[in-house]
Amino acid sequence: MSDYIVRYGSMRLLGAMSARSDSIFSRGAKVIIRTGRGLEVGEVLCAAPSEPKSGDGAENQNQSASTAGQILREMSGQDANELAHIQANAREEFRTCHRHVQELSLDMQLVDVEHLFGGERIIVYYLAEGRIDFRELVRRLATEFQTRIEMRQIGVRDEAKLLADYGDCGKTVCCNSHLIEMPPVSMKMAKLQKATLDPTKISGRCGRLKCCLRYEYDTYLDLQRELPPINSEIVTQQGRARVLGHEVLAQQLLVQMEDNRRLQIGAGEVVSVIRKANKGKPKD
């Protein structure tokens, strides 16, 4: 049996899918797969490593997928027509679901409705502040669509993953392209990278801090450790000075000399550190 990493579903789940040993699929191939949710359409990304190492991206992908599955076949013309028919009905299914939500006065925001290729179920994605009693809604939808209804409460980041298209960078939003899990992002990361602290400029389509602030954070931390802490007393090639600021990527320091001159020097010009700043009292 051959294994492939396949992306599938509205939430762009990833999973290692098994295929017959005589089946070969190229990157980007559209395939029909069977998962724990039912019959679905997927996209082949790559061959799965046979023995993923600890921390390997493929292992993380497998863990992040809702379930592993099986590749049944490459998508045929008939399959493509069936998928087009499902997608053509998607807007009407959304309107029907929205109408029932309004009639029942449910305190929830409908985000998306996913109709599985095999028709085994329809998944309703929604936002809500608290718990919602949607038993009557499920009963109505099951009667309307004659299939199993699954309600899935999501967060604002997941909403962006479902609906967003492009970010400020001009590229497809990360959560809808390559991200498997949403990384934790904090203002500390933005400050270290000297990004603007204007919320409108460092927030993504979801309204939360941009995930890309996380990408280079570890590199910034490693580079920052090579620099004397801010407020440290140092000896430079030009005399004693106090560290006022860092340019982490450039590996440069803003220092104040004993005669109160302020200079920008390279980290390599530091001869020694006389006294490190007290932790917990850094100045930026």
Image (cartoon, rainbow, N blue to C red):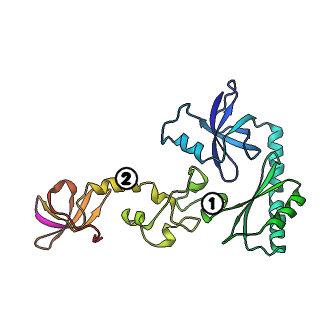
Q: Residue at x 24, y 63 (%)?
A: 229
Q: Residue at x 22, y 68 (%)?
A: 231
Question: Between 244 and 135, which is closer to the camera in this rendering?
Answer: 135
Main secondary-structure element of the magenta-colored stretch: strand
Where is mark 1, residue-wise?
158
Q: Is residue 172 visible?
A: no
Question: Between 275 and 256, which is closer to the camera in this rendering?
Answer: 275
Q: Position of residue 23 (x, y in %)?
A: 69, 27
Q: Is residue 181 left or right of residue 123?
A: left
Kind of residue at disc 1: Asp
Kind of residue at disc 2: Thr
Q: Position of residue 59 (x, y in %)?
A: 54, 41
Q: Is residue 235 left or right of residue 148?
A: left
| Stretch of the chain drawn in magenta | 237-242
Q: Secondary structure at mark 2?
A: helix
Where is mark 2, residue-wise?
219
Q: Position of residue 161 (x, y in %)?
A: 63, 58
Residue 245: name its quadrant.
bottom left
